Amino acid sequence: MNAAMSAELETLWLDYNKRITKFIANRVLDRDSLDDLVSSVFLRACVATTNGNGCTESASGWLYQIARSVIWDYRRGMRRTYAVVALDDCEEHADHYPQPEEAIEQKMQGEYVRRMVAQLPEQQATVATWRLCGYEFEEIAVGLGKSCDATKQLHTRAYANLRRDIQKDTA
């Protein structure tokens, strides 16, 4: 790699690291994997640049497309696990919020929803997660290799199963 490429990659890192991190954090539930995923984005950018397939027009668009690919790859290989969060873990972050009790309650609800989604069949969990992250049905359908109608059906089944499971859990 020559000095010009190295400088270009360093500039990309400095300009886009925080934005790419935020982009991935908004789409991936597992905070422990966040740094690895961000590193993968920039590693792929480095490899592409070294192979002569680097950014030709919009560095921003190019990096976000790489980030989307990294997220899709991560989700495809993701094992469906969840962690139960202790109240102590919630309390250490509560000082960032005006009302600590509210922050703890939100954290517990978020973890509860993640746990319930993790219990769904894999494709239903995937569709539910992506919808919660703000993806449109068309985008999810492309990522799953399914029709838009099939994706909507998976979504409907996922939410029906979530309602049923939550009602059983709270009864």
Image: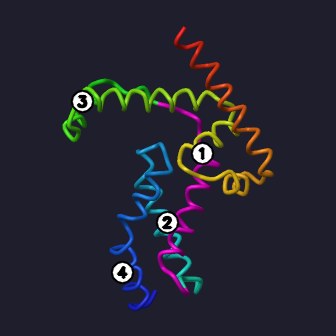
Which residue is painted at 80% across and 52% down in the image? 147
Task: Give the side of residue 132 with respect to residue 92, left or right.
Answer: right
Name the kind of residue labelled 1 in the image.
Arg
Disc 4 designates what residue? 11
Mark closer to the chain start, 1 or 3: 3
- Classify 10 Å Cα crowding around label 2: few (below 14), some (14-19), many (20 and above): many
Magenta span includes 3: no
- The numbered mark at residue 91 is 3
Pointer 4 with pointer 2, Cβ within 8 A: no
Give the structural element (helix, strand or loop) at label 4: helix
Q: Main secondary structure of the magenta part?
A: helix
Mark closer to the chain start, 4 or 2: 4
Q: What is the C-alpha distance between the residues marked 2 and 1? A: 23 Å
Disc 1 designates what residue? 131
The picture quadrant where one finds residue 128 is top right
Mark closer to the chain start, 4 or 3: 4
Q: What is the C-alpha distance between the residues marked 1 and 4? A: 33 Å
Name the kind of residue labelled 2 in the image.
Val
Q: Where's residue 106, x and y in %? A: 36, 31
Task: Give the side of residue 118 with respect to residue 141, left or right.
Answer: left
Name the kind of residue labelled 3 in the image.
Glu
Q: Where's residue 5, x and y in %? A: 44, 87
Extent of the magenta region: 56-82
- In the image, residue 120 above or below residue 69: above
Task: Give the side of residue 120 with respect to residue 100, left or right.
Answer: right
Q: What is the C-alpha distance between the residues marked 1 and 3? A: 29 Å
- The numbered mark at residue 41 is 2
Pointer 2 with pointer 1, Cβ within 8 A: no
